[in-house]
Amino acid sequence: MADVAHAVGVSSGTVSRALRGLPGVSDALRRRILRAAENLDYVVSPAASGLVTGRTGSVAVLVPFIARWFHAQVLAAVHEVLRGAGFEIVLYHVEGTAERREFFETLPVRRRADGLVVIALSLTEREARRLDGLGMPVVGAGTCLPGGLPEVGIDDSEGAAKAVHHLANLGHERIGMIRTTDDEGVHQGVSRRRLAGFRSAMGERGLEVAPAAVVSAPWGADGGARAMGELLSLREPPTAVFAEADDVAVGALRTLRRSGVDVPADMSVVGFDDSPVAELLDLTTVGQSVREQGLVAGRLLLDAVQQVGTGDSRVRLGTRLVTRGTTSRPGGASHPR
Amino acid sequence: MADVAHAVGVSSGTVSRALRGLPGVSDALRRRILRAAENLDYVVSPAASGLVTGRTGSVAVLVPFIARWFHAQVLAAVHEVLRGAGFEIVLYHVEGTAERREFFETLPVRRRADGLVVIALSLTEREARRLDGLGMPVVGAGTCLPGGLPEVGIDDSEGAAKAVHHLANLGHERIGMIRTTDDEGVHQGVSRRRLAGFRSAMGERGLEVAPAAVVSAPWGADGGARAMGELLSLREPPTAVFAEADDVAVGALRTLRRSGVDVPADMSVVGFDDSPVAELLDLTTVGQSVREQGLVAGRLLLDAVQQVGTGDSRVRLGTRLVTRGTTSRPGGASHPR
DNA sequence: CAGGATTGCGCAAGCGTTTTAGTAACCGGC
DNA sequence: GCCGGTTACTAAAACGCTTGCGCAATCCTG
């Protein structure tokens, strides 16, 4: 910066003000300074400027998974709005209990970011408190953060209910559900709320939920496949299943195909998320606006970082049933209803 | 840091050395300092320390896509090794020509990272030079960087050849290929090399490549579906197709299913990548070790950043044919060969 | 046209580290 | 008991910015 100042014949303070568009610099001079900076290929040192301003110019994103569709999608959206606002995105991937504990123990974000967005990670009270004590804004996306932290998400319970009502409307009475085991409490909250929605909708329709009709398996196609196997081995298997996520439903479909069970004639399947695989496999599913959640989360954080106290800090987005080819009346009448 | 120093009754210089494990501090004193720092919940300011050392403690990752399987996978692996080495990961997502140009124009990484890894982005000469002038180590993963920059990747040409040989061995003679259009030159290099491998293997086997049998379509299932449609509308359609990527092959399968073309009896399909969808759809494909590429890229960058001049800076990993259910002899004889 | 505002800029004090040079204390060896 | 050599630490100079304060010069206003 001193070089630029010297080249133009002004003080470095003036260069600083000119470069950041602050008032107090005449237009003509500002232009000369900008040109000189350009010529000298000069950019301000974030470290030096951060040292005095106390701001880092970057925001952190905490994700439990990078490669899963939901998380990647939200991450991309968050990146889009924050990057657009001039922030750098620093990524913290905590997969597994050990990494997670270490993150909350050492809090590597300290002094490294101006804000934090947590993507689809169910936090414990303690963890939420740790983040709160961080002294920087925190927002959640697709989570449920304890302690009233700002967040954006969907109504998981209502979404699950939509699946149930759809199946019940088709005439199904024995409806099973596939949940995911979650040893590390990553999406505990989501899973619990979807189950609650399932149960309450079943209750509303006067349908009974057999204890054995709710099975849990690890996340992913293999888990879903296994869970479906369990359901098929019941004395009286359900005629329809609601899977907590598309990635799981996909495995269920595999088991059904391999078992020669016709979908949807002999078994209807509903997923959740409306991810690309759902479309690929023509899976009926409960859709959510993933990208939108990321955008909103980004904006919420932006507002918080820039101290713009705009309205709601807890946004809830809608879900919609996307009917495709994996659901029909039980028994397979071709024209439902 | 001054607080810690004062609490222990030493100078801040000593605290600095103690905290970083440098010699010149007695063990007893070091322990007291560490304890005091702990109690005061103190962590060094990266900005201040970066200001004097000139190092940022973070590395940048440049990706054209976040949500695609390959990129997410590599990103996760890169994150794993770099994070393990104490670096923060800052993410630059450049999707689209505008973002890309802006990135290479303004080079926001300048002064913000100690190194850069470029994931699966074909760079122009000019872009590569820009990065080279960055004054920080750059490594590529799944790309082909001009100018001899260090990188990890696979032999795309050989991979494509494996697909051809597999099909030829099964007795196919009319083999088509589905490429992806790439207006923005994102994976140009990869696409070109796979085509080259396809052509040369076809030549080796004495098979002719009809010009119309190589079609291009946008990336993704829809593109693949369209391309397959084109192939099916030829006067003499191929009996097998090699798709540049699983994500594209998947669309081809959809078209085939909808067209009532039996796979593999009437049409064999081979993908590339061995992504989860390939397994899901029982797609024969050319597998590559994606995670491994990320790990290697991370280590290459680490070596470069830490000035450890270890051996090869251009690593080429192997590919392997994964035979599944979408390939068989033409005509569908159940027992190939 | 005198007086107070306003504008445009330089000066210099920090911001919180690292690091070099320097100093005091101790240690063994003759 | 004096002397080179360690060892353990302090003092202070950077690092490259931002920003409050001060000071001319220029601008209005009555």
Image (cartoon, coloured by chain):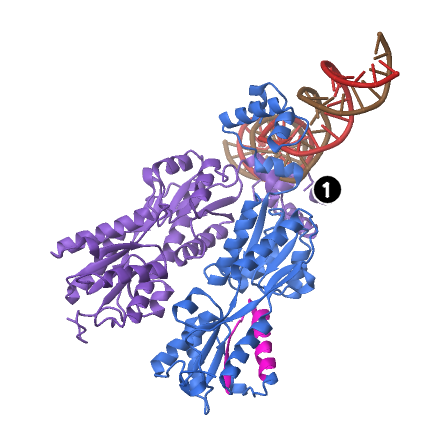
Chain colours: A purple, B blue, C red, D brown
Looking at the image, which residue is at 57% across and 83% down? Answer: B202
In front of the other: D24 or B51: B51
In front of the other: A330 or B170: B170
**Quadrant of residue B207 within the rendered picture:** bottom right
In front of the other: B270 or A133: B270
Looking at the image, which residue is at 35% across and 79% down? Answer: B257
The C terminus of chain A sits in image quarter: bottom left
Measured as percent of width and height from the top left, residue B169 is found at: 52, 82
Can I make out residue A25 in this image?
no
**First to last magenta residue range:** B174-202
Measured as percent of width and height from the top left, residue B164 is found at: 54, 79
The type of residue carrying mark 1 is His
Looking at the image, which residue is at 50% across and 52% down? Answer: A83
What residue would you read off at disc 1?
A: A6
**Left or right: B333 with respect to B136?**
left
Looking at the image, which residue is at 38% across and 76% down? Answer: B254
Whether residue C9 is situated above or below residue A200 in the rendered picture: above
